[in-house]
Image (spheres, coloured by chain):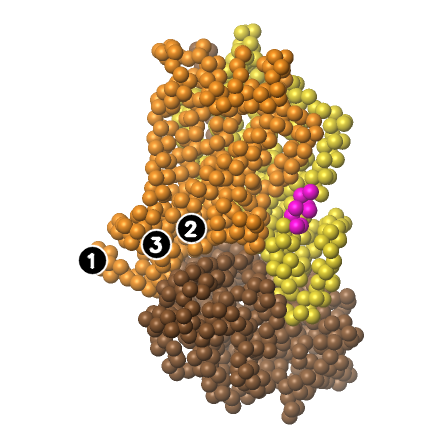
């Protein structure tokens, strides 16, 4: 229609000019901004080291947090009575005195620990450190409660259970003398790694005035601690600063900190790796997996190192309390069929193959030929098929439980395929949300899962950390169960009880017995181990990593800018 | 009008109630054993600890009491996340700047662009310009933000170093802020521009065939007046309506994908986190805020309709 | 206008009838309305091309089992972690030692489009994934359109308390952003399942996606009906003594047909997109089943080292959504004669 022409022309002009204006303004703004941003970035980089982490800590309150992301910071913010050495490799898993004058004196029966607090210590807010603060800190961590309380503290310290269940006003087994600085801890039974337990950030002393009763999680204003660093400016789930503690003047083996850090939490791990590659941020968190695509570039920088931290075992649990895996042959079939080098590829090449439950960094780790498949790197499919046939369990339907995040999901899918390959007729995968996964499979009564993914990172270099929780028949509980395979072998239970009392420092005396137990577990196929994880330590060019810690990963004192 | 507003307010309250009940029940149902204490207590907790947490947070009480307590906490501002221990309101306050930056910037970008492009396509209907614009808008509506965003970060950000690799910078550094917002604005807008300009083109074409437009033309009004006063006025209605509700949703955390891909720690990102963590309290609060903003804007739109189209009766 | 009737054929007749007067010269008189629309559509080459593309995509995806069994000889969930294949006479690992999958071999018989993170054949998974995506898209769209249109007309027509109830429930769903509601429902249903909607069926995701979009249809239709019901022809119909249902679906429905027709392809496209987003975020299709969304999500883990893992499903997704949209646009132009007025 003819009359439209004028409208069209008019509108054509105005719309195009609006468009052009929008595009133009955006382009100019972008150019200016890009320039300014580059300068600002350069300025910021000079002063502070930025650490990028995919998931952040659960909390920066040591009384709650039980994640690697929290511990790697907090172990240098909340020094315990004992702590770990600031050194490289296995030496970094050795205990040294922290706020105490010496390592604890252990009584002959292993049930009494005695330490003396150093004099003249101050918290980051300047308040003096008192011996009674240790009791206060333990009470606080048990009350909140800290994620590891029920495993490492309440069962062992006299009166801790009564305190935790509100049956007592204080923990009767801990006595502290503020005048002499002497702290005495009474245990209900000998517990080998207790000196290591004292090094947990959750038991690093806090200033009672900054952590008032009634105890609650102080997520954005955690209590003041005594350590080389302190945490400030917390924006939960986003970022926080880790700055040198002005009131820390250095202790033997624990120097003063000089370098300030800021941690940014960005779930987009790929972007994190890229920005470290571009040197616009400095540190990539070791607990995140470098996307395989960026690995070659990361390695080429020369600031990348794959570290086999003390211990991290990945396995599929096999539930011995119900078919098909109450049948030992069926369990052995699964173990025989695992193609571990394949699993390693799914984890960016970071898994080392093995058939023993303890990772190589833990004293007592099994050695010698694997009892079922001779070469765990390739597995033995023919043997697996034969074993399954003998077991007669091929028709039992199996549901494999698994987490959703990568590369775990990839591992689980490969595992499902392996089960089908060795002859199981009905296998299906059940994905569970990550946040919910371990409590879901921990429902040993209601869910009672047959098999699925599981992992464990060491809390301290002692086999009991693994066996005492994950394979101990005495540790099975109805909910929040960690012995997912419900392994309840009388011989195993007996040995765990016997070897668990040996202090970490004297583990070499029983290493042979642990190794024998390792072979026993591998032979009975109580778990299908598919690898030990090593972790990527990756930084930008303007940072040097002098040492890392085999338990906590980063040692901030070992990172320097230049 | 007063009656209309009062009724709206009352139904709004009812709706907030319904929406909160639905969300609350959804998450109670989803948790193993129906008891969030087991999850909050963590992997290694024992029965005593789980029980204590149950008692402390009131999970041992009947569900309706739990609901009342949770809502009371949300409204008096004392609600906190069981999983992460933060105060929910202050946490969301910290998330607001990123989300508002995204919503306002992208909203203006996509509204203006789609009005311009939609009108242009309509008056050039059937011509070359229209075809090109149609195909472009089709590409736009077909591009998922997570795909577009990832590709942008990888190639424009990393390879070409033209944009940052994500993250939010406070508006107190205006240039840095702008630099970090460009890609998210673009990514979020592309989807809407395609959609809006199509809808606008369609309704302009529809309106041009309407009797009242023909009448206006017959009365001898200039084409420009006909277009602006009659055609655009009616055709913009669905656009403004959509825009208001979409903006409300983005402010309430609807841009989950864009915020997640670009690591903008805003309300949508927080919502994704809280769903992942089964953090019922945080999610409930976010949903309340979103619902509130959507309902308020929805009511405003109804009033706007009445003003622009006198044939609608507000009763 | 003295038109009545409630089947779709009659609506189209109505639409065409009202258009008769404005048809450009050269149009033969006396041709049925369907034919007329079809003729117009056929003249729109772009729309036709994309319509054909979409049909081809559907056929291709339906042929997935045949391709999988008879050509590629590998199942959609069959991984190959440590195997090697011959590419151009050389043996190459399907997965490199760091886990980067092999790229396209362009050999139709194995790994035509390369491997994914688990060493599975991307081409095979792409077709199976397409089946999931399209199935969910269509089922979800039907749920949305049928319920959305009915509710919109009922609310707009009756007004009063019926409108109040529908609109408030509608607002309730509205006020949850689509993706947020989708993830919430998807996560919850995947954890516990509900009736027949347990986590392993695609129906769960289809239900979630379809449900989420209902208000997107209800709102505009209700708004349009609010205006329409004040028009003369509704009054006329009422005076003729027609019942409410007759008026709603005989008189009003044809008048909102253009909106519905715009919305069908739009909702199909949006449903496919939302499914992709949910699956990308892990709240949609569950492993080891694939959809284009899960494939993109998994592919981003090895992107850009193996960009085919993102590109292949990305292109398919965008192509499918785009062809639905473009064809839908052409369909709308062909069926809605009023839009011709401006040409």
Range of residues picked out in magenta: B18-25
The answer to the question of whether label 2 and label 3 lie on touching residues, with beta carbons closer than 8 A, is: no
Q: Measuring 66% from the left and 18% from the top, which residue is drawn there?
A: B310
- Callouts 2 and 1 on one subunit: yes
The chain drawn in orange is C
The chain drawn in brown is A
First in sequence, mark 2 or 3: give its number.
Answer: 3
Q: Which residue is mark 3?
A: C75
Tell me, yes or no, whether the highlighted magenta stretch contains residue B23: yes
Dot 3 surroundings within 10 Å: few (below 14), some, or many (20 or more)? some
Q: Residue C290 bears which disc, if any?
A: 2
Dot 1: element: loop
Q: Measuring 63% from the left and 60% from the top, which residue is drawn there?
A: B33
**Nearer the observer, disc 2 or disc 3?**
3
Q: Measuring 45% from the left and 47% from the top, which residue is drawn there?
A: C293
Q: Residue furthest left?
A: C89
**Nearer the observer, disc 2 or disc 1?**
2
State whether the magenta stretch is mostly helix, strand or loop: helix
- Tell me, what hue is chain B? yellow
Q: Quadrant of residue C217?
A: top right
Dot 1 surroundings within 10 Å: few (below 14), some, or many (20 or more)? few
- Callouts 2 and 3 on one subunit: yes
Q: Residue B300 bears which disc, if any?
A: none
Q: Residue C89 bears which disc, if any?
A: 1
Residue B50 in sight in this render: yes
The answer to the question of whether label 2 and label 1 lie on touching residues, with beta carbons closer than 8 A, is: no
What separation in Å lies between label 1 and label 3 (alpha carbons)? Answer: 24 Å
What separation in Å lies between label 2 and label 3 (alpha carbons)? Answer: 12 Å
Percent of width and height locating residue B203? 52, 23
């Amino acid at each position: 229609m003819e009359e439209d022409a004028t409208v069209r022309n008019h509108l054509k002009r105005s719309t195009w000019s609006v468009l052009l204006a929008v595009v133009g303004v955006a382009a100019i703004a972008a150019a200016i901004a890009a320039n300014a941003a580059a300068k600002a970035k350069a300025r910021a980089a000079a002063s502070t080291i930025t650490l990028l982490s995919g998931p952040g800590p659960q909390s920066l309150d040591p009384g709650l947090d039980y994640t690697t992301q929290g511990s790697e910071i907090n172990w240098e913010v909340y020094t315990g009575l004992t702590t770990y050495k600031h050194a490289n490799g296995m030496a970094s898993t050795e205990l040294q005195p922290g706020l105490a004058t010496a390592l604890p004196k252990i009584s002959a029966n292993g049930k009494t620990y005695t330490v003396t607090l150093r004099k003249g210590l101050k918290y980051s807010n300047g308040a003096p450190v008192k011996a009674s603060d240790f009791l206060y800190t333990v009470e606080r961590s048990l009350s909140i409660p800290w994620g590891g309380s029920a495993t490492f503290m309440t069962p062992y310290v006299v009166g801790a259970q009564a305190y935790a269940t509100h049956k007592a006003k204080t923990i009767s087994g801990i006595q502290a003398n503020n005048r002499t600085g002497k702290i005495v801890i009474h245990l209900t039974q000998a517990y080998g790694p207790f000196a290591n337990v004292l090094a947990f950030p959750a038991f690093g002393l806090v200033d009672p005035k900054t952590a008032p009763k009634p105890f609650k999680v102080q997520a954005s204003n955690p209590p003041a601690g005594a350590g080389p660093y302190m945490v400030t400016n917390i924006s939960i789930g986003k970022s926080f600063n880790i700055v040198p503690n002005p009131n820390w003047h250095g202790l033997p083996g624990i120097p003063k900190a000089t370098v300030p850090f800021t941690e940014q939490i960005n779930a987009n791990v790929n972007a994190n790796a890229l920005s470290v590659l571009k040197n616009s941020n400095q540190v990539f968190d070791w607990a995140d997996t470098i996307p395989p695509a960026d690995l070659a570039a990361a390695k080429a920088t020369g600031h990348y190192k794959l570290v086999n931290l003390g211990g991290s075992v990945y396995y599929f649990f096999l539930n011995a309390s119900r078919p098909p895996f109450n049948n030992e042959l069926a369990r052995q079939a699964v173990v025989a069929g695992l193609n571990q080098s394949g699993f390693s590829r799914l984890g960016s090449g970071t898994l080392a193959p093995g058939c023993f439950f303890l990772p190589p960094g833990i004293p007592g780790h099994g050695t010698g030929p694997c009892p079922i498949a001779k070469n765990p790197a390739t597995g033995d499919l023919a043997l697996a098929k034969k074993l399954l046939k003998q077991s007669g369990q091929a028709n039992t339907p199996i549901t494999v439980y698994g987490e959703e995040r990568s590369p775990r999901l990839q591992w689980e899918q490969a595992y499902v395929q392996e089960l089908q390959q060795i002859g199981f007729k009905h296998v299906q995968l059940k994905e569970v949300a990550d946040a919910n996964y371990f409590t879901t499979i921990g429902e040993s009564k209601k869910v009672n899962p047959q098999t699925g993914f599981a992992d464990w990172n060491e809390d301290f270099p002692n086999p009991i950390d693994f066996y005492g929780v994950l394979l101990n028949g005495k540790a099975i509980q109805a909910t929040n169960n960690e012995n997912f395979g419900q392994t309840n072998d009388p011989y195993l239970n007996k040995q765990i009880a016997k070897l668990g009392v040996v202090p970490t420092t004297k583990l070499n005396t029983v290493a042979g017995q642990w190794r024998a137990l390792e072979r026993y577990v591998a032979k009975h196929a109580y778990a299908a181990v598919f690898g030990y994880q090593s972790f990527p330590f990756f930084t930008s060019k303007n940072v040097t990593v002098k040492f890392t810690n085999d338990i906590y990963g980063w040692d901030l004192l070992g990172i320097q800018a230049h | 009008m007063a009656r209309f507003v009062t009724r709206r307010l009352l139904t709004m309250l009812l709706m907030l109630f319904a929406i909160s009940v639905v969300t609350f029940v959804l998450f109670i149902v989803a948790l193993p054993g129906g008891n969030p204490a087991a999850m909050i207590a963590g992997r290694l907790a024992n029965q005593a600890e789980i029980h204590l947490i149950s008692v402390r947070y009131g999970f041992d009480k009947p569900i309706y009491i739990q609901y009342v307590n949770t809502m009371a906490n949300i409204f008096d501002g004392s609600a906190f996340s069981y999983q992460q221990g933060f105060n929910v309101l202050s946490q969301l306050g910290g998330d607001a700047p990123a989300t508002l930056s995204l919503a306002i910037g992208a909203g203006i970008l996509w509204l203006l662009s789609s009005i311009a492009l939609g009108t242009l396509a309509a008056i050039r209907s059937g011509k070359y310009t229209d075809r090109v614009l149609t195909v472009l808008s089709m590409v736009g509506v077909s591009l998922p933000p997570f795909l577009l965003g990832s590709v942008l970060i990888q190639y424009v950000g990393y390879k070409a170093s033209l944009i940052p690799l994500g993250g939010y910078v406070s508006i107190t550094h205006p240039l840095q802020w702008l630099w970090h917002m460009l890609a998210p604005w673009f990514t979020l807008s592309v989807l809407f521009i395609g959609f809006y300009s199509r809808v606008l083109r369609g309704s302009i074409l529809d309106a041009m065939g309407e009797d009242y437009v023909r009448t206006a033309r017959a009365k001898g009004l200039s084409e420009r007046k006909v277009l602006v006063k009659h055609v655009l006025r009616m055709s913009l209605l669905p656009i403004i309506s959509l825009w208001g509700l979409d903006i409300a949703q983005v402010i309430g955390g609807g841009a989950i994908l864009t915020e997640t891909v670009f690591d903008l720690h805003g309300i949508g990102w927080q919502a994704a986190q809280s769903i992942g963590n089964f953090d019922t309290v945080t999610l409930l609060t976010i949903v309340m805020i979103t619902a509130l903003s959507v309902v308020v804007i929805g009511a405003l739109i109804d009033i706007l309709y009445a003003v622009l189209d006198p044939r609608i009766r507000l009763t | 206008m003295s038109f009545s009737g409630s089947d779709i054929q009659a609506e189209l007749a109505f639409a065409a009838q009202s258009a008769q007067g404005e048809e450009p010269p050269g149009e033969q008189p006396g041709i049925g309305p369907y034919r007329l629309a079809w003729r117009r559509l056929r003249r729109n080459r772009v729309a036709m091309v994309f319509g054909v593309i979409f049909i081809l995509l559907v056929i291709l995806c339906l042929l997935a089992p045949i391709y999988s069994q008879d050509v590629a000889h590998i199942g959609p969930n069959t991984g190959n972690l440590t195997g090697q294949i011959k590419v151009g006479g050389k043996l190459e690992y399907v997965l490199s030692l760091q886990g980067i999958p092999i790229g396209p071999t362009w050999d139709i018989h194995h790994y035509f489009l390369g491997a994914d993170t688990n060493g599975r054949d991307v081409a095979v998974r792409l077709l199976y994934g397409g089946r999931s995506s399209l199935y969910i898209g269509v089922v979800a769209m039907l749920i949305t359109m049928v319920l959305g249109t009915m509710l919109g007309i009922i609310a707009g027509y009756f007004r009063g308390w019926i409108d109040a109830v529908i609109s408030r429930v509608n607002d309730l769903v509205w006020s949850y952003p689509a993706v947020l509601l989708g993830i919430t429902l998807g996560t919850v249903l995947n954890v516990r399942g509900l009736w027949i909607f347990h986590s392993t069926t695609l129906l769960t995701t289809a239900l979630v996606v379809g449900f989420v979009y209902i208000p997107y249809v209800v709102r505009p239709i209700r708004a349009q009906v609010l205006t329409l019901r004040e028009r003369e022809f509704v009054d006329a119909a009422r005076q003729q003594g027609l019942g409410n249902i007759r008026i709603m679906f005989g008189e009003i429905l044809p008048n909102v047909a253009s909106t519905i027709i715009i919305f069908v392809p739009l909702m199909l496209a949006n449903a496919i997109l939302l499914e992709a987003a949910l699956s990308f975020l892990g709240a949609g299709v569950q492993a080891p089943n694939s959809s284009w969304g899960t494939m993109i999500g998994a592919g981003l883990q090895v992107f850009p080292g193996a960009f085919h893992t993102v590109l292949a499903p990305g292109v398919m997704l965008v192509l499918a959504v785009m062809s639905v949209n473009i064809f839908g646009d052409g369909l709308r132009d062909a069926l809605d004669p009023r839009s011709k007025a401006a040409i």
